[in-house]
């Protein structure tokens, strides 16, 4: 994909976004740790997390709103990561937030001005979705100059946002970029929200109106609130004219280092590309997680970390990498993020040590486990079945310590 608007580095995009909103009176907050100060959340997964008590009216700020560039980890779609170039488990989220100080109209107008005037994204490639019943937001986009056929309405699954089972939530409106007909599915029904690669969502504007109690009850919040989140790497992908997140400036060199380790070139074999993307993604997220104090374990956030590291190690094996290698990629992650996150370099030795210990521990398990699983799969196939017996899965996990999610993944493949 070649872009017909000026290219920008990830660092330039981050500054432009934050300056734009600072000039309009919103206060800059640093990213919180990936380990949130909130027992209802495993890991920071959105910019709004650190502002929860402002949404709930328990705290107030004198400025009209806040902005941040928040480190986020999301692993709910871990199986998609690597399969395509649109998902990352670790990403930075640019956001503007307001707790009564900014109207919905204003928030949409600022978003529109920023992407069309500052970032100069062409309007004919921008698409907008609104929640089914949200005529008001539909009319705002229309009044800003968006054509009717560039606005679609989506239901609760797509256009209602909540950080977790409890807490502030509400209907949302998403902004998509048309990556081109040639990368789409070609279906006449293809539109924003379609699973294919054509429309990439990059900014979500949530109109946080409710506080969910986790049991299906929603209390209306005192103020109409704004919570927007833009995927920094996604915008960088658009601004740099590349067609996937693994080729943006801050990610590309990490993947290059993995390719060199594996002696495999990206773009020659789709299966190998998947492994390269999985490893690149997972070593990024695990480096940041360990830096923020997470250690591998069998539960909670420690298990998220363990799962990511083990998945990355296994894909290293699929690429034919002999021995442990993940700790060698950690310095590249630290180097590529040095200007914004110097703490990765300050804690480099510690992060490398945690990765190396986990990888070595896993190496022993994986080799024996893979051989056993391989023969189990062969036996299952020979018996004419297409599902591994539960007792085999149990035996692998209980006797050989081979993780069930990995068994599931390999069996699926
Ligand atoms: N909280 C919303 C999201 O994460 C918008 O910031 O998508």
Image (cartoon, grey):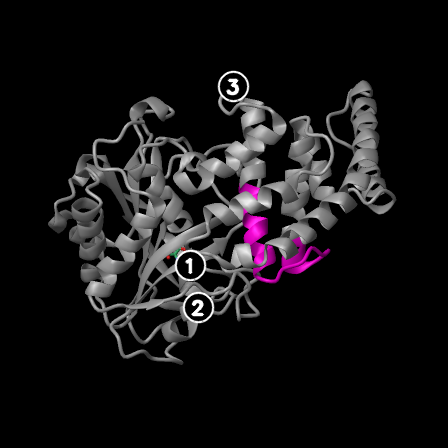
| Lateral position of residue 102 relative to residue 276, left or right | left
Mark found first going from the N terminus, 1 or 3: 1
Residues shaded magenta: 281-303
- Residue bearing mark 3: 268
Q: In this view, does 155 lie to the left or right of 288?
A: left
Residue 101 is situated, as x and y percent measured from the top left of the image, at: 24, 72
Q: In this view, does 9 lie to the left or right of 349?
A: left
**Vertical comparison of 41 with 179: above or below:** below
Q: How crowded is mark 2: few (under 14 residues within 10 Å), some or many (20 or more)?
A: some
In-front residue for pair 346/264? 346
> Mark 2 and mark 3: span between their CA atoms?
42 Å
User: Residue 70 bears which disc, if any?
Assistant: 1
Residue 186 is at least partly visible in this image: no
Query: Is the C-beta separation of discs 2 and 3 under 8 Å?
Result: no
Please identify the quarter of the rendering in which residue 185 is found: top left
Task: Tell me the distance, in whole angstroms, between the alpha carbons under discs 1 and 3.
Answer: 34 Å
Residue 392: percent from the left, percent from the top?
Answer: 83, 36
Q: How many labels does the image show?
A: 3
CB contact under 8 Å: marks 1 and 2: yes
Q: Quadrant of the C terminus?
A: top right
Instruction: Look at discs 1 and 2 and give the one toward the viewer.
Output: 1
Secondary structure beneath dot 1 equals strand
| Residue 283 forms part of the magenta stretch | yes
Q: Residue at point 35% right, 55% down?
A: 94
Disc 2: residue Cβ within 8 A of ligand 1's nearest atom: no
Residue 289 visible in the shown view? yes
| Residue annotated with mark 2 | 50
Mark 1 surroundings: few (<14), some (14-19) or many (≥20) residues within 10 A:
many
Where ligand 1 lies, by image quadrant? bottom left
Work out whether residue 262 or residue 108 is closer to the camera in this orientation and state it.
Answer: 262
Up the image or down, 223 lies above or below 358; here it is: below
- Mark 2 or mark 3, whichever is nearer to me: 3
């Amino acid at each position: 994909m070649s872009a017909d608007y000026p290219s920008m580095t990830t660092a330039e995009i981050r500054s432009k976004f934050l300056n734009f909103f600072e000039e309009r009176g919103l206060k800059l907050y640093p990213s919180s740790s990936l380990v949130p100060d909130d027992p209802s959340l495993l890991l920071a997964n959105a910019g709004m997390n650190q502002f929860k008590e402002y949404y709930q009216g328990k705290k107030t700020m004198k400025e009209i709103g806040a902005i941040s560039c928040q480190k986020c980890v999301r692993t709910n779609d871990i199986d998609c990561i690597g399969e395509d170039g649109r998902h990352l488990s670790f990403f930075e989220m640019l956001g503007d937030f307001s707790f009564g100080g900014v109207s919905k109209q204003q928030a949409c107008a600022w978003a529109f001005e920023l992407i069309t005037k500052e970032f100069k994204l062409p309007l004919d490639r921008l698409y907008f979705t609104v929640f089914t019943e949200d005529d008001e937001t539909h009319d705002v986009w229309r009044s800003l100059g968006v054509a009717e056929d560039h606005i679609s309405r989506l239901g609760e699954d797509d256009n209602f946002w909540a950080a977790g089972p409890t807490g502030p939530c509400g209907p949302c409106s998403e902004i998509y970029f048309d990556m081109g007909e040639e990368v789409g599915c070609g279906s006449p029904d293809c539109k924003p929200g379609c699973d294919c690669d054509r429309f990439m969502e990059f900014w979500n504007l949530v109109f946080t109106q409710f506080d969910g109690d986790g049991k299906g009850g929603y209390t209306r919040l005192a103020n109409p609130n704004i919570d927007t989140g833009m995927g920094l790497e996604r915008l960088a992908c658009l601004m740099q004219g590349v067609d996937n997140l693994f080729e943006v400036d801050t990610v590309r060199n990490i993947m290059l280092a993995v390719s060199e380790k594996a002696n495999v070139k990206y773009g020659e074999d789709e299966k190998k590309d998947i492994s390269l993307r999985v490893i690149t993604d997972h070593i990024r997220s695990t480096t940041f997680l360990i830096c923020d104090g997470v250690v591998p374990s069998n539960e909670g956030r420690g298990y998220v970390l363990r799962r990511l590291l083990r998945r990355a190690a296994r894909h290293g094996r699929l690429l034919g990498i002999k021995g442990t290698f993940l700790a060698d990629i950690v310095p590249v992650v630290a180097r590529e993020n040095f200007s914004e996150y110097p703490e990765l370099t300050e804690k480099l030795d510690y992060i490398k040590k945690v990765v190396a210990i986990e990888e070595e521990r896993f190496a022993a398990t994986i080799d024996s486990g893979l051989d056993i699983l391989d023969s189990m799969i062969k036996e299952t196939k020979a018996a004419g079945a297409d599902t591994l017996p539960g007792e085999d899965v149990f035996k692998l996990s209980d006797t050989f310590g081979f993780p069930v999610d990995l068994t599931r993944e390999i069996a699926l493949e």
